[in-house]
Amino acid sequence: MTKPVFILNGPNLNLLGTREPHIYGTTTLAEVEEMCRARAKDHGLEIVFHQSNSEAEIIDWIHDAINDASGIIINPAAFTHTSLAILDALNMVKHPIIELHISNPHNRESFRHHSYVTFAATGFICGLGVNGYALAVDAVAELLKDLQSVGKKST
């Protein structure tokens, strides 16, 4: 069995469902977690799901993922635009990383157009609402299958 996929959520996402529903919708983070667990199960994967308003805690989870995860899905929220420390941590990860945003940051204020996380990401999903989480699980599952196929061919 493969290691779990870590799904990491940044600041203010604990208020999903009530925070700016015209931008982020009315689905709660608990409902998003449930959706991710179901989708991961469809792929035979397990997930570890975290949310924090603390940059340091997110970095610690990324460090844990270096050895304890098979991939990372990260919605860094506002840390997307500010955190070189999260980028540095992600750069140490050798497995797939999907950067995820519920809204499309490129359709919003200009300060949201830049992402430090993108420099470490394998892929980027944005603007699809909370459904982007399920697509991110699908993407990680496919990337992991591809990596397993390559590993089997080289042995």
Image (cartoon, rainbow, N blue to C red):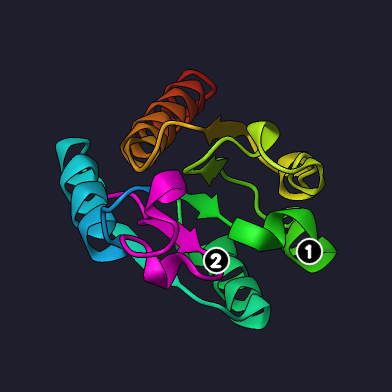
Residue placed most toward the observer, 101 or 92: 101
Q: Residue 10 carries which label?
A: 2
* x 50%, y 22%: residue: 150
Dot 1 or dot 2: first in sequence order is 2
The residue that appears at 41% across and 46% down in the rendered structure is 22
Question: Crowding at label 1, few (<14), some or many (≥20) Cα neighbours within 10 Å?
Answer: some
Res 46 seen here: no
Q: Is residue 22 magenta?
A: yes
Q: Indicate the secondary structure of the residue bearing disc 2.
A: loop
Which of 139/107 is in front?
Answer: 107
Quarter-wise, where is residue 30 in the image? Answer: bottom left
Q: Is disc 1 in contact with disc 2, using a CB cutoff of under 8 Å?
A: no
Q: Which amino acid does label 1 sit on?
A: Ser
| Crowding near the residue tagged with mark 2, few <14, some 14–19, many ≥20 C-alpha atoms within 10 Å | many
Up/down of 60 relative to 121, above or below: below
Quick check: 41 left or right of 101?
left
Residue 50 x, y percent position in the rendering: 41, 70
Spatial CA span between label 1 and label 2: 11 Å
Figure quadrant of residue 47: bottom left
Q: Give amino acid for label 2.
A: Gly
Which residue position holds label 1? 83
Work out whether residue 12 or residue 98 is closer to the camera in this orientation and state it: 12
| 120 sits left or right of 150 in the view | right
Q: Give the range drawn in magenta.
A: 1-24
Residue 75 place in picture, x, y as percent: 53, 53
Residue 34 colored magenta?
no
Image label count = 2
As drawn, 153 above or below 45: above
SS state under label 1: loop
